[in-house]
Amino acid sequence: MSTLPENKNPVRDNAMTVVATALLAAFLWWAEGHLDGYKIRIINLIAINAILGLSLNLIYGMAGMFSLGHAGFMAIGAYVSALLILTPEQKTAMWILDPIAPWLTGIHAPFLVSLLAAGLLAALFGWLVALPVLRLGGDYLGIATLGFSEIIRILITNLTPITNGPLGLKGIPSHTSLWMSYGCLIAALACVARLMRSNFGNVIRAVRDDEIAAKTMGINTYSTRVLAFTMGCFGGGVGGALMGNLITTIDPKMFMITQTYSLLMIIVVGGLGSITGSVVGSILVTTMLEWLRFVENPVTIGSLEIPGIPGMRMVIFSVLLIAVIIFRREGIMGMSEFSWDRLFSYRNRVTRGGGAS
Amino acid sequence: MLEIKDLNVWYGGIHAVKDASMSIKRGEIVTLIGANGAGKSSTIRSIAGLVKGAKGAVTYTARDGERVSLLGRPPEVMVKLGISLSPEGRRILPQLTVEENLVLGAYSRSDGDGISRDMEYGYALFPRLKERRNQKGGTLSGGEQQMLAVARALMSHPDLLMLDEPSLGLAPILVSEVFEVIREINREGRTILLVEQNAFAALKIAHKAYVLEVGNITLEGTGADLLENPKVKEAYLGG
């Protein structure tokens, strides 16, 4: 017995997925050879933000838990991964405020292992937070997770022997190529899509949409929430690790509440509860924030010179965000997902409509 | 199968159920009737484990003869014990298809064959659900949603099926259809506890009935007796 939606044309869909993946690979290969470092970084950032958006969407959009703690879990992931891949020499040279904790110097792991460790440790912390906090609902949950995120940041600032305190970590060996970040994104998409299509996905939706109905069906709503939250934190940890590795420098200030807000922005614009929406939101928000930088440059119209106003792009961005909320409250994708079936039926409708006119 | 002794339920400061006692025998249809706010829903919600702070003794005799005290246990334990509630207002999941709703109803089970059998049973009871099996729950009509809610409650293969206001918001013709199915489910050996405002329809099919008034059980008897009772006639059957 399957709960998957009926797939009308599996052969075509699989072929299309292979083609699309190949096209993405071709694009990445081309980008690697032809685009400058700045653009490559933005393309990387799109993938990482999509992973982070997806993990927050699992918690907020799909399981309906308003969490404001994602920056905290990202921080855990970023620090765990960085501490595992920095060489012992780098570590001894970097800690100047306090000497590094001796046990930490020798610990070393390959990058992929460090990603896994980042996810697992973030998930462990997520689980520990979830146990008491998920007894709360709604706004209280948001406040409690926000508080937790700040606690993590302050701990990182003050645990100098482990984290190098406010100085942060520098010179992290970079492994985050386009292939790495898009590989991780595809893996994340596959995992979440599979999860949400399974019966457990329906259980999560049931807990979100109607707690009483879920309870009468014998679902333990509390442990379902804890599990979904923990999984989301795993994604947050991996995403944070990738982000830190891409930038090669991390410090506690990177993981302030504004980081959580930008993720929230991505999933609200893309569509709460939509996997596709997380990717669409990430593409839009990440590129918009970069592209809008031009409004901060000085402009010359004829003889009139307008000096650039720093921060102007955030003003414009807020206006765009408000427009999305007014005209498309459910986000660009709403709760729906991309599927080849939808795409083809849409194309058929368009071409048929075009033929008639 | 179910003994309720001196059940008290409070919601905040409101004493919703006061010292209610009732008993349900295996194989019966028992109905609980009363006006809005009489405490009917509170009673079955506390049997289902959805209400915190219910006091009294609720003793359930399971299939294997084991006697279990129910109060204070979480709802998933009740479902495992063989008690299933179709909640007031149907509460089907609008985003999921009919079939997905039914699969979720079997959440507490892992016997694939039994689940398929019960799903076919549900479809046999409500053929219209089978026609609409891939349709989203939210697109069903009110009557179909009620059918889905009953079929979903049956998916946990309960011994005791509790139905909270199955006639709510249904056209009269659908009410009799739903009640006919309730009777049929009972004929196949399942015990039913039915909470209803539609006293006439409920009393007609009930073996035993209790009347709740502002939290107190004021009358009890067989369904047929209560249908003839002048007080019931005046208060609930429109003279």
Image (spheres, coloured by chain):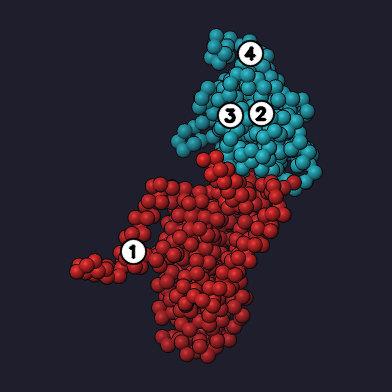
The answer to which of A357 and A235 lies nearer the viewer is A357
CA–CA distance in space, label 3 to label 1: 50 Å
The nearer-to-camera label among 2 and 3 is 3
The chain letter under disc 4 is: B
- Residue B227 tag number: 4
Q: In the rendering, which numbered label is found on residue B142?
A: 3
Q: Quick one: label 4 or label 2, which is nearer the N terminus? A: 2
- Point out residue A150 in the picture as x, y percentages from the top left corner: 42, 66
Mark 1 highlights which residue?
Answer: A313
Q: Give chain A's shade.
A: red
Query: How many angstroms separate mark 4 from mark 1 (CA)?
Result: 74 Å
- Three-letter code, disc 3: Gly
Q: Residue at x 47, y 77 (%)?
A: A36
Q: Name which residue type carries label 2.
A: Leu
Q: Colour of chain B?
A: cyan
Is B193 situated left or right of A178 in this image?
right
Subunit that carries the residue with mark 1: A
Camera-near label (3 vs 1) is 1
| Residue A24 horizontal/vertical position (percent) | 59, 66
Residue A299 position by quadrant = bottom left
Structural crowding at the residue carrying mark 4, measured as other residues with C-alpha within 10 Å and reported as few (<14), some (14–19) or many (≥20): many
State the image coordinates of residue A351 (x, y, percent, origin top left).
57, 46
- Amino acid tagged 4: Leu
| Mark 1 burial class by Cα count in 10 Å: few <14, some 14-19, many 20+ | some
Residue A63 or B139: which is nearer the viewer?
A: B139
| B233 versus B105 height, above or below | above
Residue B115 in sight in this render: yes
Tell me the quadrant of the picture where the N terminus of chain B can be found: top right
Q: Pointer 2: what residue?
A: B193
